[in-house]
Image (cartoon, rainbow, N blue to C red):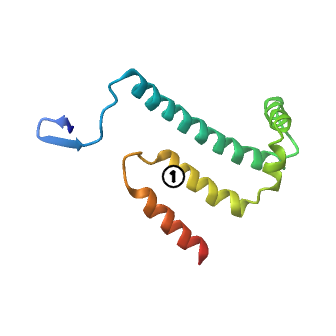
Amino acid sequence: MQALRTLQPTASTVSYTVSTRPLPRTVPARALYHAGILLRVGVALATGLLFWAKWRIASEKLSPYEAWVLALLKSWQLDRFVEAGQWRHLVPAAFVVLFLVLKRNYTGTLAYFICYSTLALTT
């Protein structure tokens, strides 16, 4: 099934988008679609929290809120992971995670990206 969307920002321009991606019409399909979006948002927020914690864990002056968040990370024993991770490993890994979070599910660029990043990391 194809879906055609028409966007007419002005009276003289028109933008068409044609997609062969099936539209989620059933309740389980829609629930799965929205759960996937929530999972992606959660992974993106966790990646941001990892960077924030790595940056703030070395700071000596913390606000009460920052101290509470870092104490929560310690209770989950994630502080060891944050302290052990080096920036040269965390930054490329975060870029890969954020790329996967932001990419569209129905495009075929994942295999190309994995091959390209593997070649870039081995050289």
Snapshot quadrant of residue 111: bottom left
Residue 10 higher or lower than 103, as above or below:
above
Residue 108, image x, y percentages: 38, 55
Dot 1 lies on which element? Answer: helix
Local packing at callout 1 (Cα closer than 10 Å; few below 14, some 14-19, many 20+) is some
Query: Residue flagged by tag 1: what amino acid is it?
Result: Phe
Residue 98, image x, y percentages: 55, 49
Q: Residue furthest top?
A: 27
Residue 12, image x, y percentages: 11, 40
In the rendered image, which residue does mark 1 sit on?
A: 99
- Which residue is located at x 79 percent, y 50 percent? 81
- Which residue is located at x 39 percent, y 21 percent? 27
Foreground of the two, 33 or 46: 33
Q: Residue furthest bottom?
A: 123
Foreground of the two, 103 or 53: 103
Query: Does residue 34 appear left or right of residue 96 in this picture?
Result: left
Q: Residue furthest left?
A: 12
Snapshot quadrant of residue 3: top left
Snapshot quadrant of residue 15: top left
User: Which quadrant is home to the C terminus?
Assistant: bottom right
Foreground of the two, 103 or 63: 103
Residue 17, image x, y percentages: 22, 42
Foreground of the two, 39 or 13: 39
Residue 78 higher or lower than 24, as above or below:
below
Please count the marks in the image: 1
- Which residue is located at x 76 percent, y 49 percent? 54
Query: Does residue 106 appear left or right of residue 4 in this picture?
Result: right
User: Which quadrant is home to the N terminus?
Assistant: top left
Residue 34 higher or lower than 84, as above or below:
above
- Which residue is located at x 85 percent, y 38 percent? 74
